[in-house]
Image (spheres, rainbow, N blue to C red):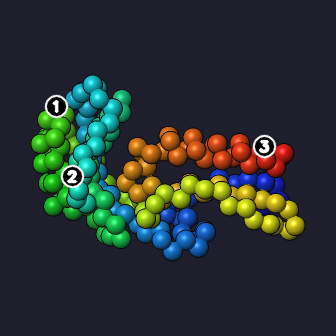
C-alpha cells in the first residue's frame, strides 16, 4: 500500500490504537436514541453538565438524535434502561421543545467512540523503503466527533497541503 501513496490520512477511530500502537486509545460507550422530529429550529445543542451523561440533540431532516452517554473505558454493548430514562429526563429538562415521548422513539443504540486524553491531530514522517512518507493523524475525538469533525478535518487538510508544498509532491 505504501508504494502507491506518499501521504495517508489516518482517521481510523477505535482501530487507531492498534494501527499506530497508541496505548492511550480506549473505547467510550455512547447510548443514543433516534426520535421522530418535532422541531427543525435548531440543528445541534449540547449541555456540558460535568457528568458522563450529558444531554444533547442533533437534528437531521429525517429524525433527531438525542443522547447521551460518554462512559470512558466501558465496553457494555447493551442498552441500559437507566441511561434510557436519564436521556429522556435530561432532554425534557433542557430541550422541552423536542417533546420527547416514548412513542416517538424509533431506535435506541449503543456504540463506541475512540477516546484519548487529547485529539491526535498531527503529521508523522516515516521512511519506507528509502522513500519519504507521511501520515496525518486525526483521531481520538471521543463524544465530540460531530462537533469537532469539521474543524479537525480542516486542520488535517491544511497539514496535507503543507506537506505537499514542503516536499514538492
Question: Which label was assigned to residue 107?
Answer: none
- Name the residue at 43% across, 65% down: 117
Using the numbered discs, state the Cα–Cα distance from disc 1 to disc 2 in whole angstroms: 19 Å
Where, quadrant-wise, is the N terminus in this rendering? bottom right
The residue identified by callout 3 is: 165
- First along the sequence among labels 1 and 2: 2
- First along the sequence among labels 2 and 3: 2
Q: Is 155 situated above or below 110?
A: above
Q: Secondary structure at mark 1?
A: helix
Q: Position of residue 128 (x, y in %)?
A: 81, 67
Whether residue 108 appears in this view of the structure is no
The residue identified by callout 1 is: 97
- First along the sequence among labels 1 and 3: 1
Given residues 100 and 152, the one toward you in this image is: 152
Which callout, 1 or 3, points to the residue nearer the camera? 3
Using the numbered discs, state the Cα–Cα distance from disc 2 to disc 3 in whole angstroms: 43 Å
Q: Position of residue 147 (x, y in %)?
A: 40, 43
Q: Secondary structure at mark 3?
A: helix
Q: Position of residue 88 (x, y in %)?
A: 16, 47
The residue identified by callout 2 is: 49
- Name the residue at 14% across, 35% down: 96
Q: Position of residue 125 (x, y in %)?
A: 73, 61
- Name the residue at 87% across, 67% down: 130
Whether residue 123 appears in this view of the structure is yes
State the residue lying farthest toward the front.
Answer: 166
Pointer 1 with pointer 3, Cβ within 8 A? no
Q: Is 26 situated above or below 46?
A: below
Pointer 1 with pointer 2, Cβ within 8 A? no
Which callout, 1 or 2, points to the residue nearer the camera? 2
State the residue lying farthest toward the top.
Answer: 41
Using the numbered discs, state the Cα–Cα distance from disc 1 to disc 3 in whole angstroms: 49 Å
> What is the total number of numbered labels drawn onto the structure image?
3
Amino acid at each position: 500500500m505504501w508504494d502507491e501513496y506518499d501521504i495517508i490520512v489516518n482517521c481510523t477511530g477505535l482501530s487507531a490504537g492498534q494501527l499506530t500502537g497508541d496505548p492511550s486509545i480506549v473505547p467510550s460507550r455512547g447510548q443514543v436514541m433516534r426520535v421522530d422530529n418535532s422541531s427543525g429550529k435548531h440543528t445541534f445543542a449540547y449541555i456540558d453538565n460535568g457528568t458522563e451523561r450529558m444531554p444533547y440533540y442533533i437534528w437531521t431532516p429525517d429524525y433527531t438524535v438525542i443522547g447521551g452517554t460518554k462512559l470512558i473505558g466501558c465496553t457494555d454493548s447493551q442498552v441500559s434502561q437507566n441511561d434510557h430514562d436519564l436521556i429522556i429526563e435530561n432532554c425534557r429538562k433542557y430541550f422541552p421543545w423536542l417533546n420527547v415521548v416514548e412513542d416517538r422513539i424509533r431506535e435506541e443504540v449503543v456504540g463506541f467512540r475512540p477516546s484519548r486524553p487529547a485529539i491526535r491531530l498531527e503529521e508523522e514522517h516515516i521512511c519506507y523503503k528509502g522513500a519519504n512518507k507521511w501520515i496525518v493523524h486525526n483521531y481520538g475525538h471521543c463524544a465530540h466527533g460531530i462537533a469537532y469533525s469539521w474543524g479537525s478535518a480542516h486542520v488535517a487538510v491544511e497539514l496535507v497541503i503543507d506537506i505537499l508544498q514542503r516536499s514538492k509532491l
